[in-house]
Image (tube, rainbow, N blue to C red):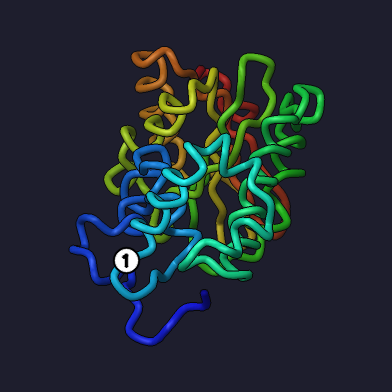
Amino acid sequence: MNDIDGGYRIKDLEESQRPRERLEKHGAGVLTNAELLGILLRVGMKGLNAVQIGQRLLYLYRGLDGLQRATFVELCQVEGVGRAKAAQIKAAIELGRRLSALKPDDRVLVNSPQDVADQVQYQMASLEQEELWVLLLDSRNQLLYTKHLYRGSLNSSTVRAAEIFRNGIRENAAALIVVHNHPSGDPSPSPEDIHLTKMLIEAGQLLELPILDHIVVGARGVASIKSLHPELW
């Protein structure tokens, strides 16, 4: 069945219970399977919101394993799903399957500032505002993923160490690399950049989640604070 006028939408839930808002605030890891499906489905049908349809799918197919095995045609026949939603579900499941099938050697190896630059410089050098990203690495220095954390004026008073380390702890990362950009184009670290780096290094030592480097990106190149100020480490 296609979406119909007057369908129950996720926005009809209280704001604190909306899965999209909860994901943005707390991360995808806190959401239930039904809530994640609800975000994919986006809109419900008469009498059921998107999360409730997600619950129905999990019940019908006895969990995510059964949902993965369900064919596109079978999903289309579930009331409240239809072709577009079935396609979204199958695409998301396939992305998850491909991610889980990645071999360690398929992941990006980060062993130098240039390796970091290869991952972020193209995107960050053209940003009009300062942004701070964190690269999460495993025990082999392979990139798990990159988390975009802050946008705007960055300094030690606005950047909270807890936010920097939360995702690394949650994902069981072995180390972090902090990256931010200078919209001016000059990647030279400022005194505030040095101060922020020192604060994060000390916090990482306490949490046993080390900061390997802090890279500054500009249109005219990149700068490694570890290379410029090894005494901080």
Residue 152 visible somewhere in the drawing:
yes
Tell me what residue is drawn at x 52 percent, y 18 percent.
Answer: 231
The image shows residue 22 at horizontal and vertical percentages of 31, 52
Q: Residue furthest right?
A: 105
Q: Residue at x 75, y 35 (%)?
A: 115
Instruction: Say whether residue 192 is visible.
Output: no
Q: Which residue is mark 1?
A: 48
**Residue 88 drawn at (x, y percent):** 61, 61
- Residue at 54% x, 18% y is 174
The image quarter containing residue 165 is top left
- What residue sits 40% from the left and 52% below the top? 56
Report which quarter residue 67 is drawn in: top right
The number of callouts visible is 1
Among the 4 quarters of the image, the one containing residue 112:
top right
* Position above or below: 85 against 168: below
Nearer the observer, 12 or 187: 12
Residue 123 versus residue 46: which sits nearer the camera?
A: 46
Q: Going by the image, does 85 lie left or right of 100?
A: left
Q: Disc 1 residue type?
A: Leu
Residue count near mark 1 (Cα–Cα under 10 Å), binned few <14, some 14–19, many ≥20: some
* Residue 186 in the image: above or below residue 176: below
